[in-house]
Image (cartoon, rainbow, N blue to C red):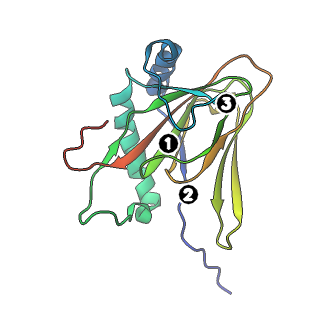
Amino acid sequence: MKNIILPNFGYVEDRIPNDLYESLLLESNKAEFQNSEMISNLSDDYVAKHFYVNDNKIKLHNYIATVLDNYLLYYPKSADIRLATTDLPFQSNKPWFNYQRQGEYLPSHDHDGIYSYNIWLKIPKKCLFEFTYTNIIGNLTQHKIILTPEDEGKIIFFHAKLPHVAYPFLGSDDVRISVAGNILFKGFNDKRA
């Protein structure tokens, strides 16, 4: 008897380099008060606030390029999206910090672009991040990622259209801080970053 696994795309997980972690953590201490706020279709009461990464944008983009290369080694067909007559290069968008306080959440959502990532900088209490996807027989399936303070510095890199949610945590007045961003196709004369 043979077992045949049908191909699908998962996510990759790693730890960011310590110097990048320290730099992002340092910027996150002031970004909520100094950087531009990112308004998204998630912005609402009890939803975590978002502020753009400024000081570490280039350093983060350079690191994310290496994560993308590794993702494509695991899932080489994940970029086979027929949208243009020629292959387009990838481009990172402007990343942002998420500041999640006790009782706040990020509702189920997906991202723009082709790929996305999330990096946890500060985790005050055990909490839950969850992916939702449709399995081969059409049932909704969840994949839970339980996070604790030991997961600070962890990155996950995944397909941008994979729905996910960051559930609220209770029992701490500290702030959960993460960094997120997207990888998109770069169009001709596209100046976004």
Q: Residue at x 45, y 50 (%)?
A: 115
Q: In which quarter of the image is residue 133?
A: bottom right
Q: Which residue is drawn at 49% across and 16% down?
A: 26
Residue 146 position, x and y percent, is 71, 41
Cα distance in 3D space between marks 3 and 1: 19 Å
Mark 3–mark 2 CB contact (< 8 Å):
no
In the rendered structure, which amino acid carries the disc numbered 2? Answer: Gly
| Residue 74 vertical placement versus 163 (above, below) | below
Q: Which one is in front, 150 or 129?
A: 129
How crowded pointer 1 is (Cα within 10 Å; few <14, some 14-19, many 20+) is rated as many
Residue 10's mark? 2
Give the residue at mark 1.
117
The first of marks 3 and 1 along the sequence is 1
Give the residue at mark 3.
150
Q: Is mark 1 on a helix, strand or loop?
A: strand
Residue 138 position, x and y percent, is 67, 70
The first of marks 3 and 2 along the sequence is 2
In the rendered structure, which amino acid carries the disc numbered 1? Answer: Tyr
Q: Residue at x 70, y 60 (%)?
A: 141
Cα distance in 3D space between marks 3 and 2: 23 Å
In the rendered structure, which amino acid carries the disc numbered 3? Answer: Glu
Left or right: 25 in relation to 87: right
Q: Quadrant of the N terminus?
A: bottom right
| Residue 6 vertical placement versus 49 (above, below) | below
Q: What element carries label 3?
A: helix
Residue 167's mark? none
The first of marks 2 and 1 along the sequence is 2
